[in-house]
Amino acid sequence: MYRFGDMFQPGTLTFMSIRLLGALVLQTRTIVTAIDDLESFIWVLCWAVFEICLKHRKLNPFEQLFRDDLHRPSDIARMIKEKTVYGFSLQQTNFPFGQSLTSITPLVEKWCTLAATYRERVTCLLSGSNASSDIHQTLNVLCKEAFREYLDEGFRALDALECKAIKW
Protein backbone atom coordinates (compact mmCIF):
# COMPACT_ATOMS: atom_id res chain seq x y z
CA MET A 1 0.00 0.00 0.00
CA TYR A 2 1.23 3.45 -0.81
CA ARG A 3 -0.18 6.94 -0.79
CA PHE A 4 -1.82 8.19 -3.96
CA GLY A 5 -1.05 11.82 -4.67
CA ASP A 6 2.51 11.88 -3.39
CA MET A 7 4.92 11.93 -6.32
CA PHE A 8 3.36 9.54 -8.78
CA GLN A 9 0.08 8.10 -9.92
CA PRO A 10 -0.48 4.36 -10.11
CA GLY A 11 -1.32 2.86 -13.46
CA THR A 12 -3.02 4.09 -16.57
CA LEU A 13 -6.12 6.24 -16.19
CA THR A 14 -8.13 3.86 -18.38
CA PHE A 15 -7.64 1.01 -15.93
CA MET A 16 -7.60 2.95 -12.66
CA SER A 17 -10.24 2.22 -10.01
CA ILE A 18 -13.17 4.58 -9.57
CA ARG A 19 -11.97 5.48 -6.05
CA LEU A 20 -8.52 6.51 -7.30
CA LEU A 21 -9.97 8.43 -10.25
CA GLY A 22 -12.20 10.26 -7.76
CA ALA A 23 -9.18 11.13 -5.61
CA LEU A 24 -7.42 12.40 -8.72
CA VAL A 25 -10.37 14.61 -9.70
CA LEU A 26 -10.72 15.96 -6.15
CA GLN A 27 -6.93 16.23 -5.78
CA THR A 28 -6.99 14.40 -2.47
CA ARG A 29 -4.51 11.95 -1.05
CA THR A 30 -5.52 8.39 -0.35
CA ILE A 31 -3.98 4.99 0.19
CA VAL A 32 -3.75 2.76 -2.86
CA THR A 33 -4.80 -0.79 -2.00
CA ALA A 34 -4.92 -4.18 -3.65
CA ILE A 35 -8.67 -3.62 -3.82
CA ASP A 36 -7.99 -0.80 -6.31
CA ASP A 37 -5.83 -3.22 -8.30
CA LEU A 38 -8.63 -5.80 -8.32
CA GLU A 39 -11.10 -3.22 -9.61
CA SER A 40 -8.67 -2.08 -12.28
CA PHE A 41 -8.48 -5.66 -13.53
CA ILE A 42 -12.17 -5.39 -14.52
CA TRP A 43 -11.25 -2.68 -17.01
CA VAL A 44 -8.14 -4.53 -18.16
CA LEU A 45 -10.33 -7.57 -18.89
CA CYS A 46 -12.81 -5.50 -20.92
CA TRP A 47 -9.98 -3.81 -22.79
CA ALA A 48 -8.32 -7.16 -23.54
CA VAL A 49 -11.59 -8.50 -24.98
CA PHE A 50 -11.84 -5.44 -27.22
CA GLU A 51 -8.24 -5.87 -28.38
CA ILE A 52 -8.81 -9.57 -29.15
CA CYS A 53 -12.00 -8.70 -31.04
CA LEU A 54 -10.15 -6.08 -33.10
CA LYS A 55 -7.79 -8.79 -34.34
CA HIS A 56 -10.77 -10.71 -35.76
CA ARG A 57 -13.32 -8.07 -36.69
CA LYS A 58 -14.34 -4.46 -36.46
CA LEU A 59 -16.13 -3.48 -33.25
CA ASN A 60 -19.79 -2.64 -33.68
CA PRO A 61 -20.74 0.98 -32.84
CA PHE A 62 -21.86 0.12 -29.30
CA GLU A 63 -18.71 -1.85 -28.51
CA GLN A 64 -16.63 1.02 -29.89
CA LEU A 65 -18.56 3.48 -27.72
CA PHE A 66 -17.90 1.34 -24.62
CA ARG A 67 -14.21 1.10 -25.52
CA ASP A 68 -14.02 4.86 -26.08
CA ASP A 69 -15.82 5.57 -22.80
CA LEU A 70 -13.23 3.56 -20.90
CA HIS A 71 -10.46 5.73 -22.31
CA ARG A 72 -11.18 9.42 -21.75
CA PRO A 73 -8.08 10.80 -20.03
CA SER A 74 -9.19 14.35 -20.86
CA ASP A 75 -12.49 13.85 -18.98
CA ILE A 76 -11.83 11.81 -15.85
CA ALA A 77 -15.20 12.64 -14.27
CA ARG A 78 -16.95 11.14 -17.30
CA MET A 79 -14.73 8.04 -17.10
CA ILE A 80 -15.88 7.57 -13.51
CA LYS A 81 -19.53 7.90 -14.54
CA GLU A 82 -19.20 5.56 -17.50
CA LYS A 83 -17.38 2.89 -15.48
CA THR A 84 -20.12 3.02 -12.87
CA VAL A 85 -22.91 2.81 -15.46
CA TYR A 86 -21.33 0.06 -17.57
CA GLY A 87 -20.31 -1.96 -14.57
CA PHE A 88 -23.82 -2.30 -13.22
CA SER A 89 -25.94 -2.42 -16.34
CA LEU A 90 -24.22 -4.44 -19.05
CA GLN A 91 -26.73 -7.29 -18.89
CA GLN A 92 -29.74 -4.97 -18.84
CA THR A 93 -28.56 -2.90 -21.80
CA ASN A 94 -30.30 -3.09 -25.13
CA PHE A 95 -27.02 -2.47 -26.93
CA PRO A 96 -26.06 -5.33 -29.24
CA PHE A 97 -22.66 -6.20 -27.84
CA GLY A 98 -20.92 -9.07 -29.57
CA GLN A 99 -20.74 -12.57 -28.14
CA SER A 100 -17.24 -11.99 -26.78
CA LEU A 101 -18.22 -9.08 -24.55
CA THR A 102 -21.56 -10.67 -23.69
CA SER A 103 -19.73 -13.79 -22.48
CA ILE A 104 -17.85 -11.83 -19.79
CA THR A 105 -20.77 -9.57 -18.83
CA PRO A 106 -21.94 -11.65 -15.82
CA LEU A 107 -18.39 -11.65 -14.42
CA VAL A 108 -17.91 -7.92 -15.04
CA GLU A 109 -21.16 -7.15 -13.26
CA LYS A 110 -20.30 -9.38 -10.28
CA TRP A 111 -16.83 -7.88 -10.03
CA CYS A 112 -18.29 -4.36 -10.26
CA THR A 113 -20.66 -5.18 -7.41
CA LEU A 114 -17.70 -6.42 -5.37
CA ALA A 115 -15.72 -3.32 -6.33
CA ALA A 116 -18.51 -1.02 -5.14
CA THR A 117 -18.84 -2.92 -1.87
CA TYR A 118 -15.13 -2.87 -1.12
CA ARG A 119 -14.72 0.71 -2.35
CA GLU A 120 -17.29 1.76 0.24
CA ARG A 121 -15.62 -0.29 2.97
CA VAL A 122 -12.18 1.17 2.19
CA THR A 123 -13.59 4.70 2.05
CA CYS A 124 -15.30 4.25 5.43
CA LEU A 125 -12.14 2.81 6.94
CA LEU A 126 -9.95 5.65 5.66
CA SER A 127 -12.31 8.52 6.40
CA GLY A 128 -11.30 10.51 9.42
CA SER A 129 -8.50 8.14 10.35
CA ASN A 130 -4.77 8.46 10.43
CA ALA A 131 -2.53 5.86 8.82
CA SER A 132 -1.99 3.74 11.91
CA SER A 133 -0.85 0.14 11.86
CA ASP A 134 -4.40 -0.91 12.85
CA ILE A 135 -5.75 0.62 9.65
CA HIS A 136 -3.06 -1.09 7.61
CA GLN A 137 -3.84 -4.43 9.28
CA THR A 138 -7.56 -3.97 8.67
CA LEU A 139 -6.90 -2.99 5.04
CA ASN A 140 -4.72 -6.07 4.65
CA VAL A 141 -7.51 -8.33 5.91
CA LEU A 142 -10.03 -6.54 3.68
CA CYS A 143 -7.75 -6.94 0.65
CA LYS A 144 -7.38 -10.67 1.28
CA GLU A 145 -11.14 -11.03 1.62
CA ALA A 146 -11.72 -9.12 -1.63
CA PHE A 147 -9.07 -11.15 -3.45
CA ARG A 148 -10.75 -14.39 -2.36
CA GLU A 149 -14.18 -13.18 -3.54
CA TYR A 150 -12.84 -11.94 -6.90
CA LEU A 151 -11.10 -15.28 -7.48
CA ASP A 152 -14.21 -17.26 -6.55
CA GLU A 153 -16.33 -15.27 -9.02
CA GLY A 154 -13.63 -15.54 -11.68
CA PHE A 155 -13.38 -19.32 -11.37
CA ARG A 156 -17.18 -19.64 -11.49
CA ALA A 157 -17.23 -17.56 -14.68
CA LEU A 158 -14.45 -19.66 -16.24
CA ASP A 159 -16.32 -22.85 -15.37
CA ALA A 160 -19.45 -21.44 -17.05
CA LEU A 161 -17.46 -20.66 -20.22
CA GLU A 162 -15.60 -23.97 -20.30
CA CYS A 163 -17.46 -25.64 -23.17
CA LYS A 164 -18.66 -22.54 -25.00
CA ALA A 165 -17.25 -21.61 -28.39
CA ILE A 166 -17.01 -17.83 -28.47
CA LYS A 167 -16.96 -16.00 -31.78
CA TRP A 168 -14.71 -13.03 -31.29
Image (tube, helix red, strand yellow):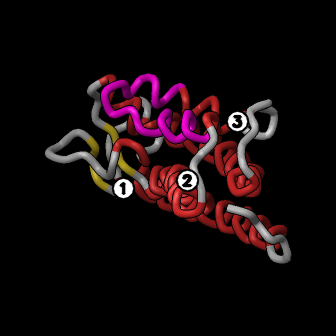
The quarter of the rendered structure image containing the N terminus is bottom left
- Of residues 27 and 107, the one drawn nearer to the viewer in this rendering: 107
Q: Are marks 1 and 3 in contact (CB under 8 Å)?
A: no
Find the magenta span and give its range: 63-81
Question: Does residue 145 appear left or right of residue 30 in this picture?
Answer: right
Q: Is residue 66 magenta?
A: yes
126 or 13: nearer the eye?
A: 13
Instruction: Return the residue at label 2.
Output: 50
Q: Which residue in the structure is indicated by mark 3?
A: 88
What amino acid type should be assigned to the residue bearing mark 2? Phe
The residue that appears at 40% across and 55% down in the rendered structure is: 136
Identify the residue shown where x is 29% and y is 53%. 2
Q: Nearer the viewer, mark 1 or mark 2?
A: 2
Q: How far, Cα to Cα, is label 1 from label 3?
A: 34 Å
Residue 45 falls in image quadrant: bottom right
Marks 1/2 in contact by CB < 8 Å: the verdict is no
- SS category of the residue bearing label 1: helix
Task: Inspect the image, locate mark 1, and give the three-letter code of the amino acid beneath it.
Answer: Ser
Classify residue 162 as left or right of residue 22: right
- Place of residue 80 in the rendered image (x, y in percent of width and height, measured from the top left): 48, 30
User: In front of the other: label 1 or label 3?
Assistant: 3
Asked if 128 appears above or below 153 in the picture, the reply is above
Instruction: Determine whether 163 is above or below 51 in the image.
Output: below
In the rendered image, residue 75, in percent from the top left (x then y), is placed at 36, 24
